[in-house]
Amino acid sequence: MQNSKLKTAHPAFWVPTLYTAEGLPFVVVNVVSVLMYRSLGKSDAEIAFFTSLVAIPWALKPLWGPLLEMFKTKKHFVLATQFLGGVSFGLLALSLHFPSFFTWTLILFGIIAINSAIHDTAADGVYITVLSEQTQAKYIGWQGAFYNVGKVLSQGAFVYIAGRLEQSIGVVSAWTIVMASFGVILLAMSVYHWRFLPTGGKPGEVKTIRETVATFWDVVVTFFQKRYIGWAIVFLVLYRFAEGQAIKIVPLFMRAGRDAGGLGLSTEDVGVLYGIFPPLAFIVGSVLSGYFTANRGLRKALLVLCAFFNIPFAVYVLLAVFQPTNFFAISVLVVFEYFGYGFGFVGLMLFMMQQIAPGKYKMAHYAFATSLMQLGYLIPSMISGVISDYLGYKHFFIWVMIATVPSFLVTWLVPFREVESGETGPALETA
């Protein structure tokens, strides 16, 4: 076999499951935990701040991204973190019964976040190493779609189950069962990927501490030597500026009483709302966007993708102003927002893969990029509860629409670098 090609199973056997395993812990820590703590009686500001705080590890990928280039194969780290993630969710389920459950669950959510961030780095490393740039573009929609399957399972199906169980066995027991179920899913994924996941390249060959430090430094220096890297960083930080504020408050807005400006939905209602049609809309949007961008090219498509990503947040202004009671009407608006979200998020992923990751350290540099992207999400997310409490839901979502302006400006202005020969991913050879 030629060195330029990596022989592996067809992407259809591992891309869907790999990105389901990547999406599930992220959605649980960032969104499902919000609903759980709401049921357990915590305030909006407290929930938004602490659930954003424990998500910081996703913004720290540069600390371990280069290390994953040095030791073992990428598959090794994927399997190990899926197994440890399953065990951690089991411990979190047990900790809900402790008197100081809030402290212990936050600690375990933090551990899950660290573990998941390492998993994401290795999983993305497999994707960008094994697949050619053209194949990356073809499967980016499926990557986003099945990342969202994690949302379907966690924010939809299991939130619905939690809502039903809350009424029959109590809040604590309900969420114990749900969190333990997430652990079982990750353990099953580790077994499946042991068989089907490609290695993602050869194991690292670093032998000494001196080599480790030198390699780490080379990773950092070469990242910041990339052409237009300053513009790229600004793009990554600002593209999600509005989303970072909206995403924490939306589930709280859904659950808040109508007298407080919310929609007054139950946990079970939220599970039904997010369990079927909005996630399907996200999947359709992601897949269509992948083919749209592959045919048009990222440079020409990016501003369109930015519009799809940001403008649909206006549906929450409508919901906050009119506070509809018709569940179908609420669902239609959320479906519209999720379609746009799925369509637009592809632009961010492809920008990182094609404009930032190519080069000697694809996985580490992609990890740098995703951490900066996550920073652009986390900072506004952490303060969103305070802003929402101060403005009220209606004026908060109007502010979110104003906050989309930086995203449009940086998308319009960001320059593209020409990827040099040899920087693209290897060609794909199916088994």
Image: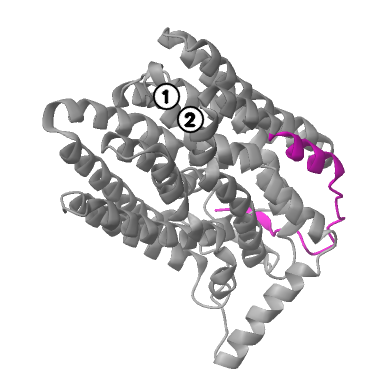
Q: Is residue 291 visible?
A: yes
Q: Is residue 285 left or right of residue 329?
A: right
- Say whether residue 255 is magenta: no
Amino acid type, residue under disc 2 in the picture? Val
Q: Is residue 27 visible?
A: no
The quadrant of the rendering that contains the N terminus is bottom right
- Which image quarter: residue 391? top right
Residue at the far top in the pictured view: 326
Give the residue displayed 18% in from the left and 53% down from the top: 94
Residue receiving disc 1: 254
Q: Is residue 168 left or right of residue 141?
A: left
Tell which of 4 and 392 is nearer to you: 392
Tell which of 201 and 168 is nearer to you: 168
Report the span colored magenta. Answer: 403-431
Badges 1 and 2: C-beta atoms under 8 Å apart? yes
Amino acid type, residue under disc 1 in the picture? Met
Tell which of 318 and 419 is nearer to you: 318
Q: Is residue 154 left or right of residue 197?
A: left
Give the residue displayed 55% in from the left and 50% down from the top: 378
x%, y% of residue 163? 25, 28
Give the residue displayed 65% in from the left and 54% down from the top: 428
Give the residue displayed 41% in from the left and 8% down from the top: 325
